[in-house]
Image (cartoon, grey):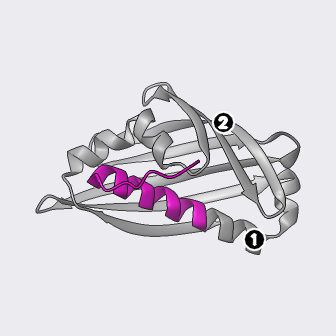
Amino acid sequence: MELSENKIIKTQKETVWSALMSAEVLSKCIPGCQQMTGNPEDGFEATVVQKVGPVKATFRGKVTLSDVLLGESLKLSGEGKGGAAGFAKGEATVNLTEDNNVTTLSYSVKAKVGGKLAQLGSRIIDGFAKKMADQFFENFKATVEGTAITEEK
């Protein structure tokens, strides 16, 4: 599954960059995130509960940052294991540009799954992955802009 999109965030690039580096901010934005720890240098560890079709699983995984160009771009790479449900792994390349205190966050995501999840079929998996990416970046935008709506996880 591959996906590319842009989000317009009504704040300065430095604010957006700082939020991308914060485990606290990221944990609020990841749908189903139960816990997140870590830092940009060592990576982040997270526990996420998600239901994909008929399969509900708790994923435990790690996200690392690479190709970091301070304040401009980075690559997030992660892998989560969901026990009998299988695994999910992927990477996202994120680029930031600013014009008049408005930041454009461009992202490109590649993801794949294995185990029981892979048996659900690519249409279900691709739809779910797109929904998750859209939800994360919408949550991120709202959080950074200060318009986040508190949701139950």
Asked if residue 144 lies left or right of residue 49, the reply is left
Badge number at residue 69: none
Asked if residue 27 lies left or right of residue 97, the reply is right
Where residue 94 sits, quadrant-wise, is bottom left
Seen from the viewer's position, the closer of residues 14 and 153 is: 153
- Image coordinates of residue 93 in percent, x first then y, are 46, 54
Where residue 6 sits, quadrant-wise, is bottom left
Magenta stretch, main secondary structure, is helix
- How far apart marks 1 and 2 lie (CA) works out to 22 Å
- Residue shown at the point (19%, 59%) measured from the top left: 98
Span colored in magenta: 131-153
Badge number at residue 124: 1
- Name the residue furthest left: 100
Provide the secondary structure element on which disc 1 rests: helix
Badge number at residue 61: 2
The image shows residue 39, relative to residue 132, as above or below, that is above
Provide the secondary structure element on which disc 2 rests: strand
- Image coordinates of residue 112 in percent, x first then y, are 71, 57
Disc 2 residue type?
Gly
- Residue shown at the point (40%, 53%) measured from the top left: 140
How many numbered dots are placed on residues in this image?
2
First along the sequence among labels 1 and 2: 2
Seen from the viewer's position, the closer of residues 54 and 102 is: 54
Label pair 1/2, CB-CB below 8 angstroms: no
Disc 1 residue type?
Ile
